Image (cartoon, grey):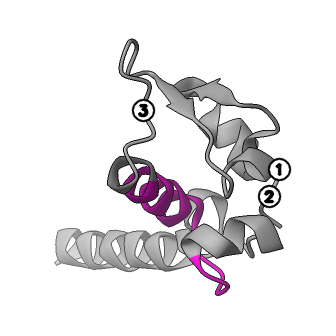
C-alpha cells in the first residue's frame, strides 16, 4: 500500500511542476514590441511560438540567403528587428529577445 501512495504523490508533484512551468522560462507569454507585432501579432506568446512564427514568415517570403541558407536577409519589416541587412540564424533568438517584454 505504501508504494501506491508514493507513486500517487509523485504523479501529483509532477503535474504541479508541469502546470507551473507553463508560466516560466520559454513557455512564459511575452509581449512583442510594435515592430515584432507586425509579424507575430499583438497578443502575448511564448518565446517558442514567436520563433516559430518568425521562421514561417522568413520561409513564406523566401528571406534565406540563397548562397548560404543559414543567413537571413532583412526585408522592410525585419530590418528594425535585426538592426542590419542580414543576420545568421544563430543570432535570431538574440534579436527577438530584445523585442520581447
Asked if 38 appears above or below 66 in the picture, the reply is below
Which residue shows up at 42% across the image and 50% down it? 55
The dot on residue 99 is: 2
Q: Tell me where residue 33 appears, x and y as whole percent.
A: 81, 69
Q: Residue at x 44, y 58 (%)?
A: 57
The residue beneath circle 1 is 98
Q: Secondary structure at mark 3?
A: loop
Measured from the top left, where is residue 42 in percent x and y?
67, 84
Q: CA distance from mark 3 to mark 2?
A: 21 Å
Q: Are marks 2 and 1 in contact (CB under 8 Å)?
A: yes
Would you identify the image quadrant in which residue 56 lies?
A: bottom left
Res. 46 image quadrant: bottom right
Q: CA distance from mark 2 to mark 1?
A: 4 Å
Q: Label the magenta part by its dominant secondary structure.
A: helix
Q: Is residue 10 visible?
A: yes
Q: Please tell me the numbered disc located at residue 64.
A: 3
Image quadrant occupied by the C terminus: bottom right
Amino acid at each position: 500500500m505504501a508504494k501506491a501512495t508514493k507513486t500517487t504523490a509523485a504523479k501529483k508533484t509532477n503535474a504541479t511542476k508541469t502546470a507551473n512551468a507553463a508560466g516560466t522560462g520559454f513557455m512564459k507569454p511575452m509581449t512583442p514590441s510594435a515592430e515584432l507585432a507586425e509579424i507575430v501579432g499583438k497578443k502575448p506568446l511564448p518565446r517558442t511560438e514567436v520563433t516559430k512564427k518568425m521562421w514561417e514568415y522568413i520561409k513564406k517570403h523566401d528571406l534565406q540567403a540563397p548562397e548560404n541558407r543559414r543567413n537571413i536577409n532583412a526585408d522592410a519589416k525585419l530590418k528594425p528587428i535585426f538592426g542590419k541587412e542580414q543576420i545568421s540564424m544563430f543570432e535570431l533568438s538574440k534579436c527577438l529577445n530584445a523585442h520581447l517584454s
